[in-house]
């Protein structure tokens, strides 16, 4: 991970900033993102697509990291946005991403969200059902607008990823069955307020088992493009979704060139404009979560490192049995002998465990540790469970860093609540 290095004096650094400095300035737990890594990874992806001679745009999946500074960093380098809610659409716009570079995905867009997408005149709405197509048509017609709509198809392929994040199988709630797509697409062309512009697919997330499933799915889409065109229908674009996995541990993972190759081999010669929607591949490795050790507790035959970060901050281990690298931050802790430890948070359930039997040194209270690859689905999935405030976020740029989201205050945690009048005293 080139953005991280161990300095013998300053300890673990993100770009040119010691994580200890960030913790001293803004407290812990704190998320830190490397702007250089965000840009480098986006550029690698854009380069791989160009290298494969694809006319393809990268739309960052905002759900992975909706921080405005992250979105601005990527948007400034030409990324569009894939959004799934009013909040994500507003964040992308607030970060300066043009509406013409925004795609709205998701299986259940509310009428209010459809209206907002239309009044902002975003690039494309990905519709996931005949029922939703009807809602978009009626809403757009009533507003005197025309929605550019892509149909998200469910190709019924197995992306061989964690069951909770696989999306392209027929039993999943996503998209419309590929067999039903031709009739619906043809019907869309005749509906008021709608211009069908193409197809979309997303088969799952954290895909590490090669690009075979992508190839299969894109092959089905290419067949569908040809058969729609044979019916005289216009297909201008194909949105290839996201899902490219990253090595959290040392597992092999496909690279952007392999993904670009799978797209080129299937959809490359159809003359369609292409999009990809990666979230994790761009943002995951760009971020760390820095936490402090509250205490080291010797249990019955086990050593527990109790941190001030918990499952409300980083839920991925509790939710998906996900593995995140955990490194000590101080130089002395880096060279100390390792022994197994369970790394846990202070929340009152056993699921609040980040790692079991992890080789870590003995760590005194207030020592720092860093969770690696925490830039995607980290802060984005935080909650305030146990009434714990949302942690601060920092952007690192070379030797500079800035607070890009303040730690939620205790006052803000209670704000918005009210007691019923009969309880007043
Ligand atoms: N496009 C669509 C329509 C999606 O549903 C998703 C992710 C993406 C793009 C981006 O996928 P990515 O490139 O980041 O894999 N919270 C889970 C991941 C959930 C992904 C949901 N959809 C985790 O922490 O592993």
Image (tube, helix red, strand yellow):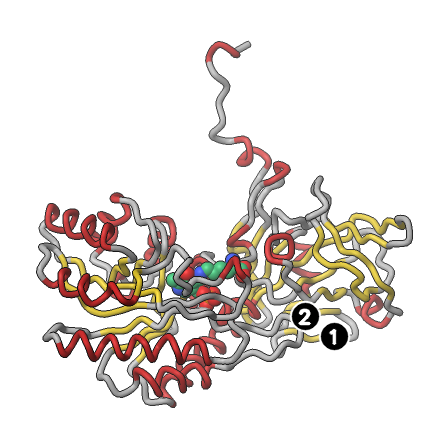
- Residue at position x 59%, y 42% in the image: 389
- Report crowding for label 2: few under 14, some 14 to 19, many 20 or more residues within 10 A (C-alpha): many
Marker count (numbered): 2
Helix, strand or loop at label 1? It is strand
Mark drawn on residue 113? none
Residue at the spot 12% in from the left edge and 74% down from the top edge: 231
Query: Are the residues at dot 2 and dot 1 in contact (C-beta closer than 8 Å)?
Result: yes
Residue at the image position 84 percent from the left and 68 percent from the top: 332
Is the C terminus in the top left, top right, bottom left or bottom right quadrant? top right
- Nearer the observer, 314 or 133: 133
In this view, 292 is above or below 262: above
Q: Quadrant of residue 34?
A: bottom right
Q: Quadrant of the N terminus?
A: bottom right
The label on residue 13 is: 2
User: Which of the 4 image quarters holds residue 373?
Assistant: bottom right
CA gap between label 2 and label 1 equals 7 Å
Q: Residue 218: give x, y in percent of width and height.
A: 35, 77
Can residue 419 be seen from the camera position used here? Answer: yes
Q: 125 or 360: nearer the eye? A: 125
Q: In the picture shown, does residue 149 fall above or below 226? A: above
* Horizontal and vertical percent position of residue 11: 75, 69
Query: Residue 241 vs residue 280: left or right?
Result: left
Distance from mark 1 CB to nearest ligand 1 atom below 8 Å: no
Q: Which mark is residue 7?
A: 1
């Amino acid at each position: 991970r080139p953005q991280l290095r161990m300095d013998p004096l300053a300890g673990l650094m993100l770009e040119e900033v010691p994580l200890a400095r960030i913790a001293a300035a803004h407290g812990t737990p704190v998320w830190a993102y490397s702007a250089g890594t965000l840009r480098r990874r986006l550029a690698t992806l854009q380069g791989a697509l160009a290298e494969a001679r694809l006319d393809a745009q990268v739309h960052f999946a905002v759900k992975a990291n909706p921080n405005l500074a992250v979105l601005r960093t990527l948007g400034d380098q030409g990324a569009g946005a894939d959004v799934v809610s009013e909040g994500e659409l507003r964040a992308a716009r607030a970060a300066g991403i043009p509406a013409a570079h925004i795609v709205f995905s998701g299986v259940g867009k509310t009428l209010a969200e459809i209206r907002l997408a239309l009044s902002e005149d975003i690039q494309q709405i990905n519709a996931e059902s005949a029922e939703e197509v009807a809602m978009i048509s009626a809403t757009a017609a009533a507003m005197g607008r025309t929605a550019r709509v892509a149909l998200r198809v469910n190709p019924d392929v197995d992306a061989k990823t964690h069951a909770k994040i696989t999306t392209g199988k027929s039993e999943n709630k996503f998209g419309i069955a590929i067999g039903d797509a031709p009739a619906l697409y043809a019907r869309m062309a005749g509906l008021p307020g709608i211009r069908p512009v193409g197809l979309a697919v997303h088969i799952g997330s954290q895909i590490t088992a090669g690009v075979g499933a992508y190839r299969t799915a894109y092959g089905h889409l290419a067949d569908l493009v040809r058969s729609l065109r044979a019916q005289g229908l216009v297909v201008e674009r194909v949105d290839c979704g996201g899902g490219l996995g990253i090595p959290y541990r040392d597992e092999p993972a496909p690279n952007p060139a392999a993904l670009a190759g799978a797209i080129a081999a299937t959809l490359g010669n159809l003359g369609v404009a292409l999009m990809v929607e990666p979230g994790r591949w761009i943002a995951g490795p760009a971020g760390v979560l820095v936490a402090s050790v509250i205490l080291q507790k010797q249990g019955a035959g086990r050593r527990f490192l109790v941190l001030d970060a918990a499952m409300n901050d980083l839920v991925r281990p509790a939710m998906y049995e996900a593995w995140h690298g955990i490194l000590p931050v101080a130089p002395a802790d880096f060279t100390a002998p390792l022994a197994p430890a369970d790394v846990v948070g202070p929340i009152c359930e056993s699921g609040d465990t980040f790692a079991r039997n992890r080789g870590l040194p003995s760590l005194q209270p207030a020592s720092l540790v860093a969770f690696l690859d925490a830039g995607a689905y980290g802060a984005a999935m935080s909650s305030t469970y146990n009434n714990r405030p949302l942690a601060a976020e920092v952007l690192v740029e070379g030797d500079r860093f800035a607070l890009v989201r303040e730690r939620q205050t205790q006052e803000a945690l209670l704000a918005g609540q009210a007691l019923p009048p009969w309880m007043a005293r």
